[in-house]
Amino acid sequence: MFSARSSFTFLRIFQCFARRCRPSLARNAAAQAQPSNAIQMRAWAVNAFNAPLVLSNVPMPTIQNDNQVIIRVKAASVNPIDVRMSEGYGNEVLSTIKCLSEFVDRRVLPQPIVDTFSRMGQGDQFPLILGRDCSGEVVEKGRAITDLDVGDQVIAVVPPHCQGCHSEYALSFRNAVAPKPASLSHTESAALPYVACTAWAALVTTGRIDPNKAQHLRVLIHGGAGGVGTMAIQMLRCWGVEKVVATCSADKMQLVEELGAKAVDYRAKEAKEQLIAEGPFELILDCASTELAEWSDELLGIWRFCVHVSVNSPLLRDTDRYGLPMGLASAGMKLLSRNLKPVLKGCFALPAFFAPNSDCLHWVTESVERGQLRPVIDKVFSFSDLPKAYEKVGKMHGKGKTVVDFDENKVPSGGIDHIF
């Protein structure tokens, strides 16, 4: 077995190697994937971190893998992760993952692993197109995709290590696409995929909730009025949990109550007393890191293997700050320290990360059609106003989602307020 020291040394060597290889590997990948006569499309992109968004003509994506699909984007959402990635958030991990794809041996590794690495190495870093989810129409698909046809209306997510969907066409993958709910417009549908996959990762993958056996659970959500929070509340209500309590600001309490949760103003002096009266909880979901959220470990049930899940992990932030080896070590130490007190009560504090999930996306479509799930949209902008959408999302005070409609004739300049 490798010692901790040898593993650390390997990470340091790989990091140095990856940093040297990134520019040349990116140029090689771009040259292979984007021929000089490539069809052009319009896309909002940044040409450097912390640079303004620019509307550019860029090569249209092409099918490189039998499990890929190209979508004509009709609407897309803007998420906080898009704003942060435009500033360089996660670059250390994501750019290293892209480099790994150059060293995949297709003759040795199993096909699912090859497909995974192929997804991770999609072209040059700049211009960087953001956007993690969309709704649109299939225009081309790989040979392995048999459950979708060209012309199908779909919802989709795009992994963070790939070029995004704030463009006229987007590349996605078989496990990241599902039929669009027929009862919703593309604008409404685009508000669902990313937050659904994130909430699913937190509640099901990390929180170990079984949707079919959740009737006796009590769940607390911090940040219940945001995109992930509003989706998590609805998911839990669909699964019939015993109680959902959500913290939010006073002006958003009505929204949270309408979605089916008990709302608590996190700024109120009596907030802790109110939460104590509602607890204990089997699961706490932290969508907004606050002092109240950290304190709420006290509300977990004792020795019932309860879990406090956070979608705000320090992993990407620490690797950006310290580099890959030291960043991984720092994030690991923080996770260990975070669990020192909870584990004494038989509880755990764990991070959750967005991941494409076919089961989740199909569940979303089915739940919408049954009338159990609805998008929560704060504001809709036109494609030409996309930078204004970033500005709004960057303020982190919205209700639900911010969506961009690619039909310029439907949305006036400045956007439309659109709750539900």
Image (cartoon, rainbow, N blue to C red):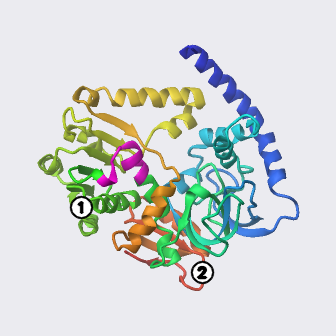
In-front residue for pair 146/115: 146
Residue lying farthest right? 36
Dot 1, crowdedness within 10 Å: few (<14), some or many (≥20)?
Answer: many
Q: Position of residue 138 (x, y in %)?
A: 65, 70
Camera-nearest residue between 267 and 69: 69
Q: What residue is pinned by disc 1?
A: 261
The residue most toward the bottom is: 409
- Front position among marks 2 and 1: 1
Taking the image as shown, residue 237 lies to the left or right of residue 27, namely left
Marker disc for residue 407? 2
Q: Amino acid at mark 2?
A: Asp
Tell me where residue 324 appears, x and y as whole percent: 59, 31
* Magenta segment: 200-212
The amino acid beneath tag 1 is Ala
Give the secondary structure at mark 1: loop
Where is residue 3 shown, x and y percent of the image?
56, 13
At x 28%, y 28%, the residue is 343
- Position of the N terminus, as image quadrant, is top right
> Could you tell me if residue 305 is visible in this image?
yes
Taking the magenta stretch, the answer to whether it contains residue 208 is yes
Disc on the earlier residue, 2 or 1? 1
Most extreme residue toward the front is: 146
Nearest the eye: 247 or 392: 247
